[in-house]
Image (cartoon, rainbow, N blue to C red):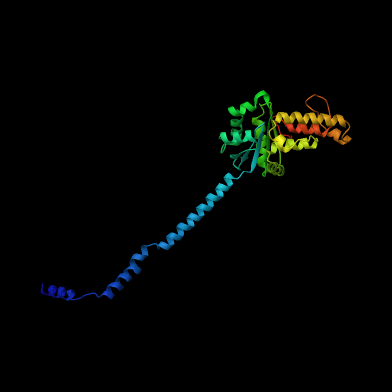
């Protein structure tokens, strides 16, 4: 018992100075606590890197989804275009005259599959007003991706084959850009180019609010007038390559009437077939 009291008394006389306490604390932090501790700077850098990677991924995905790779021009009297992304979804709806803009503003077509969007568009009550009296509906497809555009055209022709007054065509991106520069849908711009070839003297402003039925009638009228002025126009090769005009059952060699046939397109089959 006496020895224990002596030992306790000896330890009681030991006092750690401030320097010793500080050194001991630093030693414990460096060699014990820090081994299981992740530096805050590392965590911050990791968080910043992860956030940047996520932003790049989201930005890339958004670009792919919201960028149109094909377009469908819908022309009756309203003229509007559906922008289609690489996933066959409608990502833009643009009106190219007042009636078309009203439809674009009032219909919920964005993010639908293009086939469903066209079906909803043609079945809409507002659209039915323009479709009265079997008005012509012209659907024109164009895009940067030839494979996608061809597939869209075939699907549209197939889904619209039951409609007698719906005509399907293909176009190209160069014509699309010219049309947009002129303030027209590229479907209606194609018709204006045909009228220009016929020297009809129809301005872009005049054709903008015409119905496709009115345009069809004008093309037929000027085609007939031009053929009557020069019934032997075109050489023998052109005559051999000419197609039968379906409107009166007679054969004709004029390029203008072939243009009229192009305006009408085909029901349920590709123009290239």
Q: Position of residue 23 (x, y in %)?
A: 31, 73
Q: In which quadrant of the rendered image does the N terminus lie? A: bottom left
Q: In which quadrant of the rendered image does the C terminus lie? A: top right
Q: In the drawing, does residue 171 fall left or right of residue 30?
A: right
The picture quadrant where one finds residue 188 is: top right
Q: Position of residue 166 (x, y in %)?
A: 68, 29
* Count of numbered circles on the image: 0
Residue ID at (50%, 55%): 52
The picture quadrant where one finds residue 183 is: top right
Q: In the drawing, does residue 153 fall left or right of residue 30?
A: right
Residue ID at (16%, 74%): 7
Q: Nearer the viewer, residue 223 or 7?
A: 223
Residue ID at (51%, 52%): 55
Q: In the drawing, does residue 86 fall left or right of residue 17?
A: right
Q: Position of residue 3 (x, y in %)?
A: 13, 75
Q: Nearer the viewer, residue 99 or 71?
A: 99
Q: Position of residue 210 (x, y in %)?
A: 70, 32
Q: In the drawing, does residue 243 fall left or right of residue 142?
A: right
The picture quadrant where one finds residue 271 is: top right
Residue ID at (13%, 73%): 5
Q: Nearer the viewer, residue 159 or 200?
A: 200
Relative to 211, does residue 88 appear above or below in the rendering? below
């Amino acid at each position: 018992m006496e020895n224990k009291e002596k030992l306790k008394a000896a330890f009681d006389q030991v006092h750690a100075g401030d320097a010793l306490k500080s050194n001991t604390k630093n030693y414990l932090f460096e060699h014990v606590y820090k081994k299981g501790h992740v530096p805050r700077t590392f965590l911050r850098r990791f968080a910043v890197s992860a956030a940047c990677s996520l932003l790049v991924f989201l930005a890339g995905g958004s670009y792919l989804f919201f960028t149109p790779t094909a377009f469908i021009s819908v022309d009756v009297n309203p003229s509007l275009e559906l922008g289609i992304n690489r996933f066959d979804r409608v990502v833009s709806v643009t009106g190219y005259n007042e009636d078309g803009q009203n439809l674009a503003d009032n219909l919920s077509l964005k993010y639908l599959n293009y086939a469903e969007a066209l079906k909803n568009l043609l079945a809409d009550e507002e659209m039915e007003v323009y479709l009265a009296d079997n008005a012509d509906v012209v659907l024109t497809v164009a895009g940067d991706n030839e494979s996608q555009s061809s597939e869209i055209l075939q699907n549209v022709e197939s889904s619209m084959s039951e409609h007698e007054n719906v005509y399907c065509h293909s176009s190209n991106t160069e014509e699309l850009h010219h049309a947009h520069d002129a303030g027209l849908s590229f479907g209606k711009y194609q018709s204006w180019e045909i009228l220009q070839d016929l020297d009809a003297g129809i301005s872009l402003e005049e054709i903008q609010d015409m119905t496709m039925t009115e345009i069809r009638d004008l093309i037929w009228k000027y085609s007939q007038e031009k053929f009557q002025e020069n019934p032997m126009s075109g050489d023998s090769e052109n005559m051999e390559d000419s197609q039968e005009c379906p409107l009166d059952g007679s054969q004709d060699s004029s390029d203008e009437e072939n243009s009229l046939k192009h305006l009408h397109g085909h029901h349920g089959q590709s123009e290239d077939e």
